[in-house]
Image (cartoon, rainbow, N blue to C red):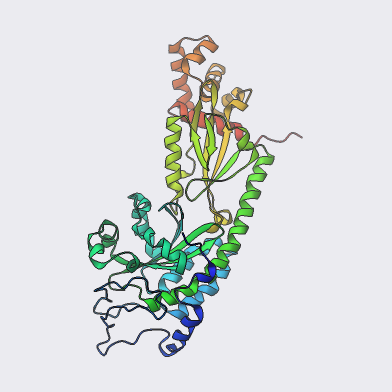
Amino acid sequence: MTPFNVNCLLLIPVTDAKARLRGRQGDMGHKQRPPDGRRSRARPEADANGAWSAVVPNLAKPAVRGAPRAVDLGGLQKVVARIQDVVAEPESWSGVLKDVSAAAGAQGASLFRATLTTPDVALVSVSAGSQQIMERYIRDGWVRRDIRTRAIPKMLKTGIGVDQDFMTPDAIEREPYYQDLLAPCGLRWWAGVAFRSGDDFWCIAIQRNAEQGYFDPDEQAKLATLCQGLTEAATITRAVGRARIAGMTAALDLVGQPALVLDHFGRVLRENAAAANLYDPWFHVVGGRIVTRDREAAAAFSTLVEACRSSRPLASNGGHIVVRRSNRRPIVASPLVLSGSAVEPFSGGRILLLLNDLDAQSQPLTSALGAAFGLTAAEARLAAMVGSGGSIDAACEALHVTRQTARNQLKSIFDKTDTHRQAELVALLARLMNAPRPRSG
């Protein structure tokens, strides 16, 4: 695949684009319209540089009651200026996308991160106009079969991708992506503005409806003016964000808290030494992926990976994953969605995964269980054993009680601790073990 070069980002050279645009200063880059106020229905032609990669037969701006929207060069220039502010205010990306959408005469815009080895994308941020379709995009699995990833090779060379690069009008009418996903939301046309940040490939996806029309070569040239500013902002914020993540995991290491940071694709972006020290055959990381022999935990981690692809993985907060191990107590993984400056888009960080090895706790906190939840001494001992991953039979043998007695005590434990099954009790014990202890003196 052709290497991505920042100097090759523009669909046509910047100097040529500016020269062409200066000749249109009177109408701020809008095209001349025919006498009836509508855009010409003429077929788009290749530009002088041959950069219009596919001239599609019968493709024309739609004839509608009102003139199709056009890209506003002045609006894009304001966006470029605002991009620099995003370095200090990562949370403002949604507003930037809204401005991009307005300047592009579109309905909405989204920020995506893509992989160059597989047709795989992750949604990072959306403007207000794209929230509805992006929810369907994630929920219905289109994120894993986005046909527009076909434009990535061209985007790597030019910085711009559009539907015309890989689809014909007839193919669009048959393609489920357009008819089943886009059409119900009133959308049709797309332009992707590509840029790089380190080894990461990014795309601002701009959505238009049928009446707003497709993005023609002149409009693509205007959108290309965003590429350099996006590249610079992404490069700076990526470095700052990665430094924040490294500092956060190092600080957790100082207090002995194992931690992993997952990226937009659910891969391990960062691990501290405490996490690496607890790896065993039942839980470890291979090629950036969490691997476990516990099938239930593996399914839970797969769900977590999918949540990382969403721009709002809120469902991940507070859901503990229990990794059971043979002849050892479990590892409890607690995912927390990163927020604020720690999750600025280009750092790549999405989820902080706190790990607790219950086997490392030599003395289960039976007294703390009793004091916190009003358990009897016998109930606290049983809760400590079962909450550490032990089986009922093993607890009965160790505590010298019958199975029926243990069941009765366990029912009382569940009632008093407001839990309903062993996994919830394990997670509760993990939180209790990690609670800060009061200082003496």
Q: Percent x, y for residue 318?
A: 49, 41
- Residues 4 and 25: in front is 4
- Residues 417 and 383: in front is 383
| Residue 86 in view here | no
Q: Is residue 185 above or below residue 328?
A: below
Residue at the image point whose x is 49% and y is 72% from the top:
226
Residue at the image point whose x is 28% and y is 71% from the top:
56
Q: Percent x, y for residue 211?
A: 28, 73
| Residue 249 in view here | yes
Q: Percent x, y for residue 204?
A: 44, 64
Left or right of residue 154: residue 196:
right
Residue at the image point whose x is 30% and y is 66% from the top:
188
Q: Is residue 244 above or below residue 405?
A: below
Q: Percent x, y for residue 353?
A: 54, 41
Q: Looking at the image, how many numbered discs can be counted on the residues?
A: 0
Left or right of residue 326: residue 258:
right
- Residues 73 and 194: in front is 194
Q: Quadrant of the C terminus?
A: top right
- Residues 17 and 306: in front is 17
Kindly indicate the quadrant of the structure image that contains residue 55.
Answer: bottom left
Q: Is residue 316 above or below residue 385?
A: below
